[in-house]
Amino acid sequence: MLLIEKFKCRAWLPSLVVGALVTACSLEIEETDSVFSKGESDVFNGVENVAGSLNTIFNNISGQAGDQANLYALTEVSTDELVVPTRGTDWGDNGVWRTVHAHTWGPTHPYLLAVWNDKNNGVLRATEVIDPLSNASALQIAEAKFARAYNMWIIMDFFGIAVFRNPTDGPDVLPSVMSRSEAYNMIVQDLTDAIAGLPASNPTASNKTRPVKATARFFLAKVKLNSAVYNGTYAAGDLQDVIDLVDDIEDEGYALVEDYFDIFKGPTFTNTDVIWNVSAGVGNRMWNGLHYNQSHPDNGGGGWNGFTTLAEFYDKFEGPPDTNEIGSDQEERRGYTQTLATTNASNQGFGYGFQVGQMYGYRSGAAVALSDRVGNPLVFTKDLPGLVGNNERTGIRLLKYSPANGAFTEGVVMARFADAHLMRAEAKLRAGNTGGALTDVNALRALRDDTPALGSINEAAMLDERARELYTEGWRRNDMIRFGVFKNAWQFKAAGDGHTDLFPIPASALLSNPNLVQNPGY
């Protein structure tokens, strides 16, 4: 986004269309490619339509979660889970995908600016609802505090600071800059307040798109589990807080469930594993990796042939190393590719999980082995030659959400009890209760077919278990930083000095607010 800056800030900034906001918030942005709606006054007098503003806040969270770029790219493509290799000229995009995977990003990377704008916009909108001038109800304030905490947490987690302005601040007041610890304390307080004010949970509800007590407890446990990253060390009680919060979620009726890939079948999620979902479509989770010739009756154009996973990530799962065909005795979470003998109209040739080897489709009432665009057998290979120089077939593709359930279904899962269960196990491990941690991990593995119990547990094994259960759900970067391995080398990414644990503050934000200081290493 092109941003032309004039040194000023407006209290009407929240009325901007989503994504057009520079929430460092000391600039007046000239109307270039952004859409503006100033309203009648620069003076904040409260939010007139609190319910509508909350709808906008949560709709924005949904839209951002469904995007393949920006937040999703920075949380997943920056890790060993996903890579977007250039294939000829396809997916070159001036290197935006390659630099994310290789950790060679800089402060002008567009995805960083998009997340900065989107999430700071969410913080400011929520703060307006919370302000007494808006006369919001207790429930509306609780929802707004959850939304503010969620959005601020992403900013704090990504950039190591948070910016904040009160809605009643005049146009010449620069937003304050919170330290990581200050932002942490505010997030914890907001989530604590949200738990008190949100409605009781219903684990089998058909609509889980708005927060309940369990949603806020989940994110408070997530924040507390990462507190050593944010504050330098765990404070007394942090790990026990994680355990207690997850116990509370479980007491409300949330529980682990079997049939792994059924968990993600939307658009409604009545299973007791899903705590929070958004209504965003899952098309980006499916078609961004599938080949152009992998079509569906409702998507005749096929996939976009971009996103893949890495061989070393695939190898974390139990099963034969060179095939993932259905019935190959692989663990359930690795999924399967369909074979000619089992392909039919109900699944249209699509499997689940890791797609490697020959791909099949269902054409004119018959199963067929697919080819690429020049006639080669469409065999997805385990290995990639590099970030560039790839053909149409290199790389394993991932389908946690599968077109077998429909070409463009809705419902992105944002929080699961399985994650909370593993957070509790990790807290026990970090607190020295290794036996309790192992029992918890094996309780989950017992529900996943062909997944044998572990004989022991340590930090490396815990991180791998989280990878196997939660891949492509947006947690891998956060997990790798907490376990101290985000700076390590993996395929197509060299070892670093750790400065990429924080992203650079976007260049335009630094220009707009002199209170900001660039993170080390950039």
Image: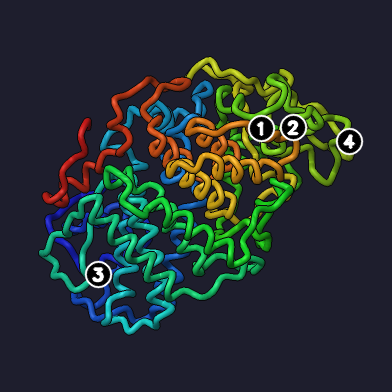
Disc number placed over residue 366 in the picture, else none: 4
Q: CA distance from mark 4 to mark 3?
A: 59 Å
Kind of residue sitting beneath label 3: Trp
x 42%, y 34%: residue = 78
What's the residue at 81%, 31% (across, down)? 327
- Name the residue tied to disc 1: 354
- Which callout, 3 or 1, points to the residue nearer the camera? 1
**10 Å neighbourhood of mark 1: few (<14), some, or many (≥20)?**
many
| Callout 4 crowding tier (Cα within 10 Å): few <14, some 14–19, many ≥20 | few
Say left or right for 258 vs 368.
left
Name which of mark 1 and mark 2 comes first in the sequence: 2
Residue 216, quarter of the rendered image: bottom left
Please report whichever mark, 4 or 1, sits nearer to the chain's N-terminal start.
Answer: 1
Query: Which numbered disc, 3 or 1, marks the residue that appears first in the sequence?
Result: 3
Q: Earlier in the sequence, mark 2 or mark 3?
A: 3
Question: Crowding at label 2, few (<14), some or many (≥20) Cα neighbours within 10 Å?
Answer: many
